[in-house]
């Protein structure tokens, strides 16, 4: 028993360490810029060169600055974001995507119980701890960027932190409402068929909060720093969280798929709506100047 307990403990530590390293790696380029002394800002490195012609132009039409981190501004923006998020599926140009999304979700729901029935019950806790570590490391990455951005007056890092946590909050609200309405049983509840409208509380199975929250922040980070390796780490961590919520029998495949879609789209919406670096930024290098 002691051997197995020690083995489980080491597995948890290893998984947490690996995902923490991934979190740190996501902010290495930005950290290098933030820690560079003033007289070293002209360093000609692959990540710290400012784009030719200076920093990207800001969108003057944005009514509330993403770098305005005051609590009042964020509270005022919250209801507006929720209204836009809930109304988005009903816009005419989104209807075809709504139909495809509903068809795909229905197909996953039909297959859910067959997938989870094939998952062995050994080492469920390992998957559960991996998913926890993935979510927490993404939260930590977002927090590091926010704190470093404020401390060093780096607008991009500060924006990534603010928008990341705003995406988190908006996804949390959407997920809680959906869980309350759907009331789906988790894989280890009842007969394991994932019945709907049975467990009507904010801790039901549909959609997966872990998946949605991780994808929301990962989406913001990947859009703020559009480098292939950053996107690989951000989306790779989010995918790992989604998969391990299923292998840990915490959720069905449909739960994590819907949660992931919600999170990704909410993160994308936050970036496109409020980022100062959106227009033309995908072809530019990360600037090293404070405030750019």
Image (spheres, rainbow, N blue to C red):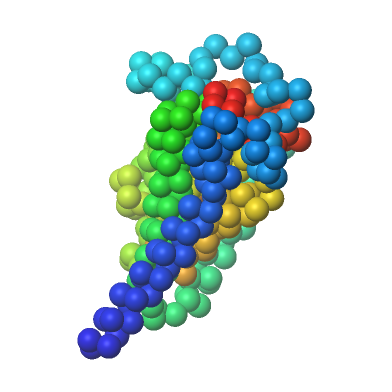
Instruction: In the rendered view, tell whether residue 53 sits above or below residue 98.
Output: above
Q: Residue at x 33, y 65 (%)?
A: 189
In depth, the one of 21 and 137 nearer the eye is: 21
Question: Is residue 97 shown to the viewer in this render?
Answer: no
Question: Is residue 278 shown to the viewer in this render?
Answer: yes
Specify the quadrant of the image occupied by residue 261.
top right
Check the image and name the residue furthest to the left. Answer: 2
Quarter of the C terminus within the rendering: top right
Specify the quadrant of the image occupied by residue 175.
top left
Check the image and name the residue furthest to the front. Answer: 39
In depth, the one of 186 and 191 nearer the eye is: 186
In depth, the one of 157 and 209 nearer the eye is: 157
Q: Give percent across and percent down for residue 168.
A: 44, 38
Q: Give percent across and percent down for residue 40.
A: 59, 35
Instruction: In the rendered view, tell whether residue 97 sits above or below residue 83.
Output: below
Q: Residue at x 51, y 57 (%)?
A: 22
- In this picture, residue 45 sits left or right of residue 65: right
Q: Give percent across and percent down for residue 216.
A: 51, 42
Quarter of the N terminus within the rendering: bottom left
Q: Give percent across and percent down for residue 252.
A: 48, 61
Q: Residue at x 30, y 46 (%)?
A: 201
């Amino acid at each position: 028993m002691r051997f197995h307990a020690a083995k489980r403990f080491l597995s948890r530590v290893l998984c947490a360490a690996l995902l923490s390293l991934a979190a740190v790696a996501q902010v290495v380029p930005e950290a290098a810029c933030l820690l560079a002394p003033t007289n070293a800002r002209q360093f000609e490195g692959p990540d710290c060169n400012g784009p030719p012609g200076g920093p990207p132009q800001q969108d003057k039409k944005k009514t509330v600055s993403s770098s305005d981190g005051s609590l009042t501004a964020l509270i005022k923006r919250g209801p507006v974001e929720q209204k836009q998020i809930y109304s988005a599926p009903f816009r005419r140009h989104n209807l075809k995507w709504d139909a495809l999304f509903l068809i795909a979700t229905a197909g996953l729901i039909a297959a859910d119980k067959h997938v989870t029935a094939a998952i062995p019950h050994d080492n469920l806790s390992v998957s559960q701890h991996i998913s926890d570590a993935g979510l927490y490391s993404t939260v930590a990455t977002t927090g590091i960027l926010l704190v470093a951005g404020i401390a060093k007056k780096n607008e991009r890092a500060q924006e990534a932190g603010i928008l990341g946590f705003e995406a988190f909050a908006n996804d949390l609200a959407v997920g809680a409402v959906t869980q309350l309405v759907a009331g789906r049983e988790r894989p280890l509840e009842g007969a394991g068929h994932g019945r709907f409208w049975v467990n009507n509380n904010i801790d039901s199975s549909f959609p997966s909060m872990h998946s949605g929250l991780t994808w929301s922040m990962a989406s913001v980070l990947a859009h703020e720093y559009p480098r292939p390796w950053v996107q690989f780490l951000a989306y790779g961590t989010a995918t790992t969280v989604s998969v391990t919520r299923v292998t840990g029998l915490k959720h069905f495949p449909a739960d994590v798929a819907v949660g992931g879609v919600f999170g990704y789209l909410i993160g994308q919406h936050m970036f496109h709506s409020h980022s100062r670096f959106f227009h033309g930024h995908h072809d530019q290098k990360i600037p090293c100047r404070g405030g750019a």
